[in-house]
Amino acid sequence: MAAPADVVERHNELKQTLNHHNHQYYVLDEPEIPDAEYDRLFQELKTLEGEYAELVSPDSPSQRVGAAPLSAFETVRHEMPMLSLDNAFSAEDLRAFDKRIRERLKSVDAIAYACEPKYDGIAISLLYRDGILVRGATRGDGETGEDITQNVKTIGTVPLKINADDVPSLLEVRGEIYMPHRGFEKFNQQAQDKGEKVFVNPRNAASGSLRQLDPAITAKRPLVLCAYSIGVVDGGAMPAQHSKILDKLGQWGFHISEHRRVANDIEGCLEYYAYLENLRPDLPFDIDGIVFKVDAIETQQQLGFVSRAPRWAIAHKFPAQEEVTVLRDVEFQVGRTGAITPVAKLEPVFVGGVTVSNATLHNKDEINRLQVKIGDTVVIRRAGDVIPQVVSVVKSKRPDGAKDIVFPEACPVCGSPVAAKEGEAVYRCDGGIVCEAQRKEAIKHFASRHALDIDGLGDKIVEQLVDKGLVHSVADLFTLQHKDLAGLERMGSKSAENLLAALEKSKETTLARFIYALGIREVGQATAKNLAQHFGTLDKVREASDETLQTVTDIGPIVAGFIVEFFEQSQNNEVVDALVKVGVTWPDVEVKQDQPLKGLTYVLTGTLEKMTRQEAKEILEAHGAKVSGSVSAKTHCVVAGPGAGSKLSKAQDLGVEVIDEDAFIAFVEGLKA
Ligand code: IVH
């Protein structure tokens, strides 16, 4: 029996609603309805399709899952070959690329380039006929790939249908499928718990997940598609600039890089490289370089291709972040809070732009997870300024005499017992300030830049001061004499004088710095600042109950517990009192009763010219606002300077208020009045 009109209508409505929520959830990361509600709507759709089989269409959300396993993938021929990119490894390479292009074009004008991250995943082609996804294929050798349509359909960021009236009747969208770090770690953890195969990196995980014959398996993998170009287009037109094409794909529901930008010339590309290299360690996914593409499509066509790569694009690669070396030994370091960290002593290796001979093994659980032994060949990863880490073991290279790593039962420095609290992976020395290692680390932290900022009190000096018994607690720093310091290694009479002057100067500090300097567990700069602003005086922080502490911004039960515990210990209070006695002071903080911007989220984007972004952020936070890095429907206002890009357009799309720097300054002045 054919479905009655009202059923067809309801089915269409459900399809649209579910596709909308899918987009909100996967592409925009802003779910509007709870999962249970989504499931209910999905169930309703499935029921209708169960009753009337003719309702099942290729763009129905039900088609994301449920296809039967295949026995093999079919081969498909790409209508337009999927090319690769030439690489640049230095600024010279990049400038030479630009020069070649301008020579070929016989042009002296600067070329505008579209700049994008180079995703480290799997290249994919998606074919849309009349807006409906009809085929998903791997790149393969560039000429032919594998048909993985049913697998790509399970990926939330892949639109099954493009809902727009200006879509060409045939459109190929190309992009990269990758697994974000968080999903990768979670997936590997689960695989390990079940005794299944773990993947060495997110790229292999993405590749392995896409090449599953059973789409139900792919559906469970946290994959993301980022669209970065188009292939065949027929029966319709696309914009004349690459950057505008991506904007269009974004409007049509594809996820596109929020970090993309257009540089006006090759020097702008180099600035972009520095910008993204800096951002790279904080990105939630792997990138291995940057892709620069001539923005004007007409110019791209004029330039054409040479063998397998376009003349109009280049990949500027980052230095490799992973290398292989040998684990020589493991040492155990004791941190400020007594945490015992196993440190891998390595055969030195050049990775991520520096020579690395130490890497962290984090904790006992991590050693067990890696199943690493001394003598093993290991993969080392160094990303940005993050401490290098051991990521995996090349088991096939294990030598005969490989030794087990024995975790110490007593602190290697003070001999106190070492134990882990229930549910914690970290083992700690319970020696507290009796432990020389903890004392040294506490003093280094106290003197560090964001704490009391004691110029000239470096790690080596602190170690000597503690070793010689000149300093037991941080308060002793302020009673040091010239003769105590002048006798230390690396310290002449003049340096000793300078250090004494720096100590004197550091006594005048702020409440937030002082709280941070105490080194209370989990109380970083931001928390210290929140505490200072909330309570205004140190005594109020000291007296605050667990419940009161939890009313402070971003403080939950765990951190509140650490703060209470800290001030319950008499030796800590003695040190605080001693510091005040030797003259460490700070102005009390005026506690703002009314925080006019409390509960409001601001986003800063583009270049601010009259103040730094950090200053703008501090002003907003001082008035109670939250400053976020991304725009969503919950954003109250976006402050946009010149050069603002995707955040600005997103704000405009969402109808979020946007103001420029002058309006912002006027607004802030108004708050003071
Ligand atoms: S454009 C002709 N853009 O890099 C242009 N590729 O060696 C070809 N890739 O296999 C691709 N991020 O999978 C382009 N933003 C991006 C990319 C990107 C990653 C990969 C792509 C390709 C390889 C090229």
Image (spheres, grey):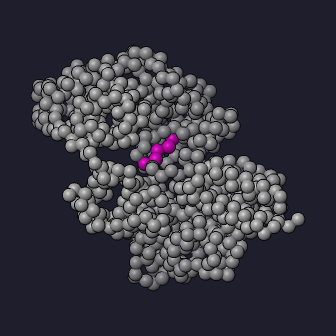
Q: Is residue 76 visible?
A: no
Relative vertical location of residue 97 with respect to residue 316 in this rendering, above or below:
below
Residue 381 covered by magenta stretch: yes
- Image spot of residue 149 (x, y percent): 73, 61
Q: Is residue 395 magenta?
A: no
Q: Give residue 494's position: percent from left, percent from top.
A: 11, 36
Observer-nearest of 203 and 653: 653
Q: Looking at this view, is 499 or 185 the one in front?
A: 185
Above/below status of 72 relative to 11:
above
Position above or below: 576 against 63: above
Residue at (22% x, 56% y) in the render: 672
Q: Dividing the picture into quarters, in which one does residue 96 lie?
A: bottom left
Quarter holding the C terminus? bottom left
Query: Please, which residue is most extreme toward the right here?
Result: 1
Residue 450 percent location from the top left of the image? 27, 41
Query: Residue at point 42% right, 70% down?
Result: 263
Asked whether residue 132 appears in the rendered view, the answer is yes
Q: Quadrant of the N terminus?
A: bottom right
In the shown orientation, is residue 394 left or right of residue 568?
Answer: right
Residue drawn at (53%, 24%) of the image = 405
Task: From the image, give the main secondary structure of the stretch colored magenta.
Answer: loop
Residue 429, quarter of picture: top left
Q: Left or right of 79: which side holds 438?
A: left
Position in image of residue 196 (x %, y %): 69, 37
- The image shows residue 613, relative to residue 355, as above or below, that is below
In the figure, is residue 478 to the left or right of 591?
left
Residue drawn at (22%, 35%) of the image: 537
> Which residues, given as a range, are shown in magenta?
380-384
Q: Quadrant of residue 306?
A: bottom right
Q: Residue furthest bottom?
A: 106
Q: Is residue 284 left or right of residue 137?
A: left
Residue closest to the eye, 15 or 4: 4
